[in-house]
Image (cartoon, grey):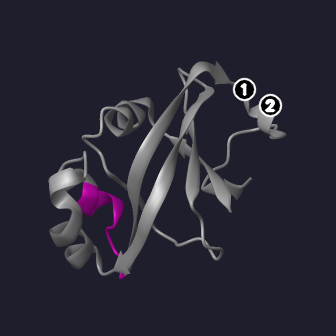
Amino acid sequence: MCKILLSINPEHVENIINKSKRYEYRKTKCKRTIDKIIIYSTLPVGKVIGEVEVVEIVEDSPEKIWNLTSLFSGISQEFFEKYYKHKDMAVAYKLGEVKKYKIPKTLKEFGVNCAPQSFMYI
């Protein structure tokens, strides 16, 4: 079992929790096979609010990824295209069961001093 800690904008965190966003997009794929994402909601929240199961990892061209995932992307096509501008590959983590913590946690509770720019194995 491998987990990663991701820094995610609070707006996107809400969409993950309410399940309107069922894919988390990244520019690079983790080298290890992961099964959970620990969600750090960036400022102004600044807390680890929960975790989500990773059901599948899809990697392909941005155009193909958008065509496959857009219905449950939780973001606009414009935002997606801007994020992947000048990129040949896109990674989409298909999200499953979400577990929201009753009491948000600090990064220190995970042995982390500062939020990762990309991701961090936990």
**19, above or below 118, in the image:** above
The answer to whether residue 71 is left or right of residue 59 is left
Q: Is 92 included in the stretch rendered in magenta?
A: no
Q: Residue at x 45, y 40 (%)?
A: 98
Amino acid type indicated by mark 2: Glu
Q: Nearer the viewer, residue 58 or 120?
A: 58
Residue beneath the point at 64% across and 77% down: 31
Coordinates of residue 72 in the picture (x, y in percent): 21, 52
Label 1: element kind: loop
Q: Give the residue at mark 1.
A: 106
Q: For the residue carrying disc 1, how many other residues have a C-alpha within 10 Å: few (<14), some (14-19), or many (20+)?
A: some
Residue 60 horizontal/vertical position (percent): 33, 81
Q: Which residues are magenta?
A: 80-88
In this image, 11 relative to 98: left or right? left
Q: Is residue 46 left or right of residue 56?
A: right
Camera-side residue of 2 and 40: 2
Q: Are marks 1 and 2 in contact (CB under 8 Å)?
A: yes
- Residue type (three-letter) at the residue carrying disc 1: Thr
Point out residue 84 in the picture as x, y percentages from the top left corner.
34, 67
Q: Quadrant of the N terminus?
A: bottom right
**Quadrant housing residue 66:** bottom left
Secondary structure under tag 2 reads: helix
Label disc, if present, on residue 70 of the rendered structure: none
Q: Is residue 38 visible?
A: yes
Question: Residue at label 2?
Answer: 109
Please give the name of the residue rendered at 32% of the width and 36% of the height, measured from the top-left corner: 15
Mark-to-mark CA distance, 1 and 2: 5 Å
